[in-house]
Amino acid sequence: MSVDYIFIMAMWVSGVVAYMFLTPKNQYRKLLFSLLTCQALLWINSLVHVEFNLLAFPVREFPKATDLLITTEYFFYPLLCGLYIAYEPKRSFKTRLIYLSVWISFITVYDVILVKYTNLVEYVHYAWYFTWIDFFCIFAVTNLIYQWIFKNKELFRIEQEAAE
């Protein structure tokens, strides 16, 4: 088994374990909504990058079906976005901005590791700082959409009380 498929399996296992054990009971709705929103934004973003030959995914799970890597673009990165929003501190804007920047920096480092040591992602006409900017914008927009949808706390009070 190649290192590429080991990375893919590790992302699936760690993602499922993180979802099961790191998500607080009262945060499942928040995480799933954030995951699906981020997934939609990331899907469009990744399709544009692949179409304009900025990124390539040489090793894919379904090479005849899509040019994207299903594990990262549809599962792992959106799950990380959901976890980011579930654990976002309820403090000042500056603290939340630092939290987002640190979170995105770790994800970018992981993406650079994928580029350097596997054939899962290839930067054709791209650089790591574009990845950082992309993830920053996608996570921030996902957070804005989440804040907009869930702004009326009273609508979700009954479910939160039931989960506790």
Image (spheres, rainbow, N blue to C red):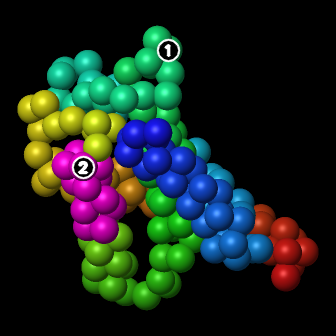
Q: Quadrant of the C terminus?
A: bottom right
Residue 106 covered by magenta stretch: yes
- In this rendering, the label closer to the viewer, 1 or 2: 2
Q: Amino acid at mark 1?
A: Ala
Q: Residue at x 31, y 59 (%)?
A: 110
Q: Amino acid at mark 2?
A: Tyr
Q: Which residues are magenta?
A: 105-117
Q: Nearer the viewer, residue 44 or 149?
A: 44
Q: Secondary structure at mark 1?
A: loop
Q: Is residue 14 visible?
A: yes
Q: Position of residue 120 (x, y in %)?
A: 33, 38
User: For residue 69, which quarter of the picture?
Assistant: top left
Q: Residue at 35%, 78% (x, y): give it.
A: 99
Q: How far apart in space, not on screen, are marks 1 and 2 (Cα)?
A: 25 Å
Left or right of residue 3, residue 18 in this image: right
User: How far from the left and from the top, in percent, is residue 102?
Assistant: 29, 74
Q: Position of residue 132 (x, y in %)?
A: 22, 56
According to the image, label 1 marks what residue?
Answer: 65
In the drawing, does residue 66 fall left or right of residue 127?
right
Residue at left 49%, top 14%? 65
Q: From the viewer's perspective, is 37 left or right of 161?
A: left
User: Considering the numbered disc 2 on the image, is that residue within a helix, a strand or a loop?
Assistant: helix
Residue 4 colored in magenta in the image: no
Instruction: Please state the horizontal and vertical placement of residue 49, each as a whole percent of the image.
Output: 25, 29
Residue 130, compared with residue 45, is above or below; it is below
Question: What residue is shown with label 2?
Answer: 117
Q: Nearer the viewer, residue 66 or 94?
A: 66
- Name the disc covering residue 154, or none: none
Which residue is painted at 46% across and 12% down in the image? 64
